[in-house]
Image (tube, rainbow, N blue to C red):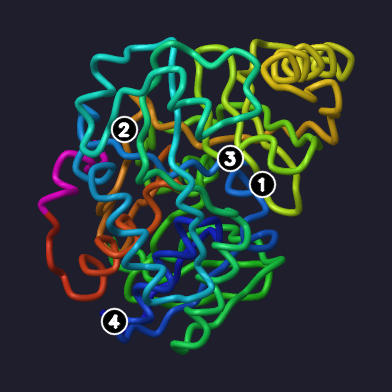
Amino acid sequence: MGTVVVVGAGIIGSSVAYHCARLGAEVTLVDKTLPGAGATGDSFAWIGASDRVPGPGGPLRAAALREYRRLADEVPDVRVRWTGSLSWGGAEPENVREAGARLLDADAVAALEPHLRHPPERAVHLAGDGVVDPVATTDALVAAAVAQGARTLFATVVTGLRRAGGQVVGVETTAGAVGADAVVLAAGADVAVLCAPLGVAVPVASSPALLLRLTGPPDLVRTVIATPEVEIRAGRDGELLAPLAHTGETTATALARSAERARGRIAAMFHSGEDVRLRSVRVGARPMPVGGHPLIGPLVPGAYLAVMHSGVTLAPVAGRLVAEEVVHGVEAPELHGCRPG
């Protein structure tokens, strides 16, 4: 496959663009905003071990950590902090079956997270888990794609797909038409609108989720902490990140109250937690395929779909496999359960 247009410069589209360019394709990456400006930028970005995830996405999740290590070796500006994770209060017996998982007592938990007020009696430790800065990772992938010869069209809206003889042959954009042998649609929930004129219904919706950014004492949180009530990790420049499930609030006041309650739960967990302050609340629109499983594969001749939740986790492996299918026509067994339709 000689020329490829990738629609969407979130972490999935940017990974696809990098991997296609690396395989020698002539790549154009198009986005209506800037790289990582959509759902990617609002991700908690926990790269977790998932050897036992059921369903079509299981093989991809099982490869996530290995593929991130491979990508970090190829693209030095992709930086993963291998912090490990601690979880408790959930389905611990299942979690302990994960490769590399250890069941820790309260003393061992306190050694990893010394600022916890009340270390749990039992917690699952996954030392191999990591976190990334999703926007910085996306920027690194775009830069690596450009270094391989890709071109970018940002602040450019794709207004439609070009068709000829029953095949997609490129895209129409606000900057003009761009021809291609293949178009990879990685624009999250926007793909449903782009695909409607093809007569293809893509079962993906926009799912709102909140991400809290907080400040606190230095080194307050060292791992990724996950409980049924709270998930929290350290971000860059000393900030703390905590996702929050959206429960239907529709006013700024109600959202602020939910965020403040979450901040209070976090503060109560730690010594010096009274110094934890809420910096901002972001409401992200995650692309959520029906059933929660990735949708990856050909739609119609010339058009290929790559939409999934947990895009940050799956970006390295999905980008590589999509590129191999699109550029070299090599079908990936790992993707057989993810096909659209």
From the top left corner, tell me how far across and down residue 16 is, in percent: 39, 65
Q: Position of residue 230 (x, y in %)?
A: 59, 19
Query: What's the distance in space between the residues labelled 2 and 4, CA to CA?
Result: 27 Å
Could you tell me if the residues under marks 2 and 4 are in contact, i.e. CB atoms within 8 Å?
no
Q: Earlier in the sequence, mark 2 or mark 3?
A: 3
Residue beneath disc 1 = 235
- Between the residue at mark 4 and the residue at mark 1, the CA separation in whole angstroms equals 33 Å
Of residues 332 and 106, the one drawn nearer to the viewer in this rendering: 106
Q: Position of residue 267 (x, y in %)?
A: 75, 19
**What residue is drawn where x is 40% and y is 20%?**
123
Which range is magenta? 333-341
Tag 2–tag 1 contact (CB < 8 Å): no
Helix, strand or loop under label 4:
loop
Q: Are marks 2 and 3 in contact (CB under 8 Å)?
A: no
Quadrant in the picture for the N terminus: bottom left
Alpha carbon separation for disc pair 2 and 1: 28 Å
Residue 23 is labelled as 4
Q: Position of residue 183 (x, y in %)?
A: 39, 65
